[in-house]
Amino acid sequence: MALKTMSAEEAARLIKNNDNVGFSGFTAAGCPKVVPAALAKYAEEEHAKGNPFKISVFTGASTGDYIDGALSRAKAVSRRTPYQSNKDMRAAINNEEVAYFDMHLSQLAQEIRYGFFGKINVAVIEACEVTEAGEIVPTCGVGISPTACRLADIVIVELNSCHPKAMRGMHDIVEFQDPPHRKAIEIFKPDDRIGADCIKVDPKKIVVVETDTPNDGGGFAPVDEVTAKIGDNVANFFVKEMAEGRMPKTFLPIQSGVGNVANAVLAAMGDNKDIPDFNVYTEVIQDAVIGLMKTGRVKFASGCSLTVSNPVLNEIYNNLDFFKEKVVLRPSEFSNNPGIVRRLGLISINTALEADIFGNINSTHVLGTKMMNGIGGSGDFTRSAYVSIFVTPSVAKGGAISAFVPFVSHVDHSEHSVKVIISEYGIADLRGKSPRQRAECIIDNCVHPDYRPLLREYLASCPVGHTPINLNNTFAFHKALMETGDMKNAKIEK
């Protein structure tokens, strides 16, 4: 049977006030564009009439401005999960206009299936192909799409001609069974495939909207002196671990988080010839991975999305025969699955917003209150990794903020899960160390020289005990920042 087609404006009106809407994609990659924009305009029209119009937004991870930006500016979002990185959505969350629940990315699809958040009413999916038999081939990001499509009453497919139909075969689409019927996941190496090359749904549910809107694929900042040094320190750590027999000479698969620091780390690993060619099992595949793939340094990459700049995406599309042999895109509950992470012996590398001297990590909140982006997939990988690494520049805001503090203002990853912390100054290997030993190791190896005396003064002020905490001074750095604009003005009480 022929699929129904309509305009983005007509499709947007299929979404009702208070609906739960699942969107495809993972980061801006694979996200629908014209329907969310039309939905934002529709919400503004309804508000102008005095009618309520807000929806709950469920995605794989963050999105582009087409979804989070447009819908938050239109005040069309009541709830948002599991992750975001848009400035307008962030402002709405921190102004308590949007109820945001921050989640481990691997858990969202199954918790939707369990019914914890209510029924998914509509799914909006970007695709490079959709057939009359109900086969939907995603573009460059998968996220929660299989679950959203299966559970939704209406599936709006943005058929985007910017993405070639020849992408078919790059995806590995599968859903978990729900307990107690769950079976083993037969992924034993990054290039194993266990699912289908498309999402299959009842074609009666499908509405098609045609578009040619390109990805919102911005580039990465150039590697600077600080990020280059962090990358070198990470690579040197791996070389030492292999030399001392704590990592196999054949190396292990790598997971790397999102952003400029992560991209710089991967580039440094590729440049270090003492690190063998390696595989990637991660959530986002970034520019550096594609560059290393072309030189043979990355043998294979499994992820949830191609989070690459538009020029790199075009390069992939122009060489699909090559890249389809080296890349697979999976739903987030498989790309981020902690059981697979533990089985493969992954090395996880994620970025800390803030760390304390015991190894607790804050990935999400500024001064403990203001949400930045969210925990994302970092927790999925950190807890189960062979070695969990967090990287961060030692200071921010021209040195007024230290990334290392007496105690983090918000805990996302506890000291029990964090094995190694690396800054531009060095490497703190926390394995097998007591809390005081951890503190001394972090101060000596990772902290900016301007802050080492203050943190040593803090440590000396702490009473004797297993964990050296002085409650009078725990947030002295944060207090100084709020009162004077510079953590170096912290006062340590004796």
Image: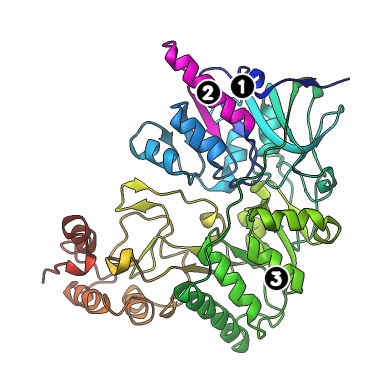
The residue under label 3 is 292
For residue 261, above or below residue 47: below
Q: Which residues are magenta?
A: 34-58
Q: In terms of secondary structure, where does tag 2 sit?
A: helix
Count of number-bearing discs: 3
Q: Residue at x 60, y 70 (%)?
A: 266
The residue under label 1 is 12
Report whether 457 appears left or right of 318. Answer: left
The image position of residue 222, as x and y in percent, is 53, 67
Which kind of residue does numbered mark 2 sit on?
Lys
The residue under label 2 is 41
Asked if labels 1 and 2 touch by Cβ distance under 8 angstroms, the answer is yes
> Split into 4 quadrants, where in the image is the C terminus?
bottom left
For residue 255, above or below residue 366: below
Closer to the N terminus: mark 2 or mark 3?
Answer: 2
Any magenta on residue 41? yes
Closer to the N terminus: mark 1 or mark 3?
Answer: 1
The image position of residue 272, as x and y in percent, is 63, 82
Which kind of residue does numbered mark 1 sit on?
Ala
Crowd class of label 2 (few under 14; some 14 to 19; many from 20; radius 10 Å) = some
Rounded to the nearest angstrom, the CA distance separating label 2 from label 1 is 9 Å
For residue 449, above or below residue 27: below
Q: Residue at x 44, y 16 (%)?
A: 47
Which kind of residue does numbered mark 3 sit on?
Leu
Closer to the N terminus: mark 2 or mark 1?
Answer: 1
